[in-house]
Amino acid sequence: MRAVRPTAIAAVTAAALTALSACTAKSEAKDGDAIQVTAADSTCDTSATSVPAGQVTLKIENKGAKATEVEILFPDDRIVSEKENIGPGTKYTLTAEVKAGSYEIACRPGMKGHGVRQKLTVTGGSAAAKRDPKLDQAVAEYRQYAQDQADATVPLAQKFADAIKAGDLDAAKKAYAPSRLGWERTEPVAESFGDIDPKTDTRADGLEKGQKWTGWHRLEKALWADKKIGAEEKTLADQLVSDLKDWQRRVGKAEITPTSMANGAKELLDEVATGKVTGEEDRYSHTDLADFKGNVEGAQKSYELLKPVAVKNDPALTKELDKQFTALNKVLDGYRSDQASYDFVSYDKVTETQRKELSDAVNALAEPLSKLAAAVVK
């Protein structure tokens, strides 16, 4: 779940989809080669408005009092590359590969709303870089994985919706967590479109002014907190299925690259750290650990597909990633009530000490995972 970004999504052209290839791991870019981005609570200053095609590096500093998010965006608001949760006084380096065209750099104080934006023109051409054929295979396999997850999600969401429409509170509760797994495994793909995630996976505190609350978490509140199913919930259940079918249709059009796979894996770990470990994601049902597992599985899938190249470029990194994925999965699986299913202990039963253990395992994995994108493009 990410903060909503209201926008009218324009038609996507094949030419526009060629632009994405990003790396958000911290790096040391030369200041003279980078665009300096100074973010504050009401401003977003950039040192350049035009750069040649190829690698674009943003040297970001947040001088505001709020955490911010900085993004490079297509004209239709699809994300080229982003970094969320840049805290006050924090610096970060964001690198992307972009082709000629028009873009925007957006700073979003508080990580909500349209944000403060600056135009960015990318000039000239960009020759396709030669890369290991194994990376093309990884992209193809991940694309199929993302489609398979979407295809599997729709009937599970329909089962959830059918239970709601039948007024069966217990059956709807039972169907809720399974309906989310495919989404949680591949959420960065859905987020790249900009408009689907806000309709399906926004929490109450992520709503923009005037935005109607729809999707899983609105229904979650009805089932667990309100303990009732009314006409509105039945309508929202149908809308959720419709929105997820839209996601299913659009997955094949997503721009997927080796670096977007690597960065997406890190984004999934960030999702765990900012929502699941804290218990904020599924605050009514306390099914956070099932979502947690889905995020980790999605991150691990990307890593495993990229590993044949990463292990050649940085064997020490892949050794550490293997170790930390194993450690995190071991801790997480200790909370499964049934090892053959996705039935986990209710998260409100997990103590603060246990949550810290989970958080420490996530952080131990997140640090080396942030280096994966660099390892596959060496």
Image (spheres, helix red, strand yellow):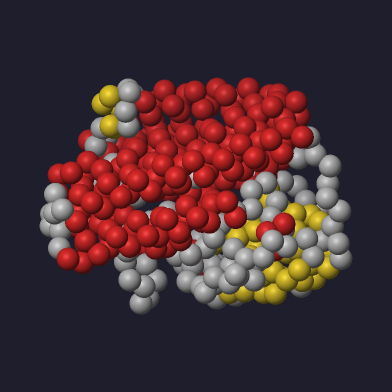
Q: Name the residue at 47% across, 36% down.
A: 296
Q: Name the residue at 73% across, 32% down.
A: 134
Residue 124, by quadrant, is: bottom right
Left or right of 14, for residue 67: left
Q: Name the residue at 25% across, 43% down.
A: 175
Left or right of 235, for residue 95: right
Residue 49, by quadrant, is: bottom right
Left or right of 324, for residue 288: left
Q: Quadrant of the N terminus?
A: bottom left
Q: Looking at the picture, tell me which residue is in the foreground, 223 or 364.
A: 223
Q: Is residue 78 visible?
A: yes
Q: Is residue 86 visible?
A: no
Q: Looking at the picture, tell me which residue is in the foreground, 220 or 70.
A: 220
Question: Residue 237, how many percent across, how many down?
Answer: 27, 58
328 to 233, vertically: above or below: above
Question: Residue 298, how many percent across, how many down?
Answer: 50, 38
376 to 237, vertically: above or below: above
Q: Name the residue at 46% across, 31% down.
A: 361
Q: Quadrant of the C terminus?
A: top right
Give the total of numbered labels: 0
Question: Residue 171, how many percent across, how many down?
Answer: 18, 44
